Structures are given as C-alpha cells and as structure tokens.
Image (cartoon, helix red, strand yellow):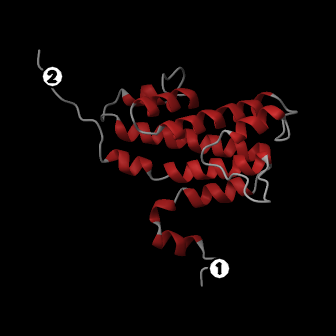
C-alpha cells in the first residue's frame, strides 16, 4: 500500500540511487531551521565536490584542487561556479545553489537571522526547485527553502554516477 511507510532498506532495494538522500532527509528533518540550512548546504557542497571529482581526469593533482587549505575548488562558491562552467549542473541548479549559499551565509554570520527576515523571504522566493503558493495555500519562506533545497538535492543526488560515465581522459595533444 503506497501510504504505508516503508523502511529505508525496502526503499533502497527499489531505488538504490537514494542511498545518500534518505539519511540526508532524516538529519535535515531533525534539525532546527538554522540547522536545516547548514545540513542542506553542507550536503550540496559535498555533492558538488563528488560530481566534479567524478568528472576530472584521474590524477594525484586532483585532490589538491578539491580539498585542503587554499584548494582552488575547495569552497561551496567555487564548486558551484566550476560545476556550472564544466556543464555538470544547469543554469537553474547553479542559481539555486548560489541562492542557498547566500541563505547559509546569512544564518552563519548573524545569530538573529530568521526566515521571517525580508531578505531571506526574497531569497527563498527565487528558488526554482521550491514549492510555490497555489490557490489558498501560502508557502512560507522556510517551506520554500526546505522544498527548494530538497528538490535540488534530489536532482543532484545521482549526478555523480552519471557524470563518471563521461569522465575526462588524459590525452596527447598535437604540437
């Protein structure tokens, strides 16, 4: 019966690509709104890192680009831009990642920030992957954030697998 809650094991047998998504949902849903923002952005940052890693050529230098102190592709912002410029995420996915990054920064740098703030309300309205108001149902800023972040995570959760099929290869170039 579709309305009966299934265990993660049952779901993963049918949809193995959700192995990272289901734990994300559990953790995100257990958090405060501020915590949910941090969890979602951390998860997206990690997904972008994996997507880029699975696309770049196999080389020991790759880790220096992606990880560690002063890594050129070590920040959420640089990963968003890189994944987009490499054609690994769409314009809308890039826009939503960037909007979520701005929301994260608001919560990370101001302890008074809440989803009632006009700035955050406006940012959340811009999320392409979020639920929108319809008929007499109003989706508040936190609802727009949570549906937008979850929709984006779901879009990207299996992207690394598909990207790895098109991994760049080292080649010899003519002189």
Instruction: Tell me how far mark 2 sits from mark 1, CA to CA.
Output: 57 Å
Q: Indicate which disc, 2 or 1, sits on the residue closer to the N terminus.
A: 1
As drawn, is 172 to the left or to the right of 99? left
Quadrant in the picture for the C terminus:
top left
Q: How far from the left and from the top, in percent, is residue 70?
A: 53, 20
Mark 1 neighbour class, 10 Å CA radius: few under 14, some 14 to 19, many 20 or more: few
Instruction: Tell me if residue 60 comes above or below residue 160 in the rendering.
Output: above
Residue that protrudes farthest toward the bottom in the picture: 1
In this orientation, which residue lies closer to the viewer: 91 or 101? 91
Q: How far from the left and from the top, in percent, is residue 74?
A: 52, 28
Mark 2 neighbour class, 10 Å CA radius: few under 14, some 14 to 19, many 20 or more: few
Name the front one of labels 2 and 1: 1
Q: Could you say which disc has been placed on residue 173 in the image?
A: 2
Residue pictured at 47% horizontal, 72% vertical: 13
Residue pictured at 81% horizontal, 41% vertical: 115
Residue that protrudes farthest toward the front in the picture: 135
Q: What number of labels is visible?
A: 2
According to the image, label 1 marks what residue? 3
Contact between labelled residues 1 and 2, with CB atoms less than 8 Å apart = no
Residue pictured at 11% horizontal, 19% vertical: 174
Q: Secondary structure at mark 2?
A: loop
Q: Secondary structure at mark 1?
A: loop
Q: How far from the left and from the top, in percent, is residue 31?
A: 76, 52
Residue that protrudes farthest toward the right in the picture: 112
Residue pictured at 45% horizontal, 42% vertical: 50
Instruction: Tell me if residue 116 comes above or below residue 19 in the rendering.
Output: above
Residue that protrudes farthest toward the left in the picture: 174
């Amino acid at each position: 019966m579709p309305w009966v809650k299934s265990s993660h094991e049952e779901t993963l047998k049918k949809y193995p690509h959700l192995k990272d998504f289901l734990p994300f949902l559990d953790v995100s849903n257990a958090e405060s709104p501020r915590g949910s923002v941090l969890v979602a952005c951390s998860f997206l940052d990690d997904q972008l890192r994996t997507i880029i890693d699975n696309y770049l050529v196999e080389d020991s230098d790759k880790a220096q680009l992606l990880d560690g102190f002063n890594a050129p592709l070590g920040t959420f912002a640089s990963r968003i831009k890189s994944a987009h410029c490499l054609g690994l995420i769409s314009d809308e996915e890039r826009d939503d990642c960037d909007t979520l990054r701005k929301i994260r920064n608001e919560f990370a740098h101001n302890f008074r920030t809440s989803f009632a703030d006009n700035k955050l309300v406006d940012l959340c309205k811009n999320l392409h992957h979020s639920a929108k108001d319809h008929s007499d149902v109003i989706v508040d800023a936190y609802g727009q954030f949570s549906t937008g972040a979850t929709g984006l995570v779901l879009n990207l959760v299996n992207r690394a697998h598909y990207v790895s099929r098109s991994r760049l290869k080292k080649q010899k170039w003519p002189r």
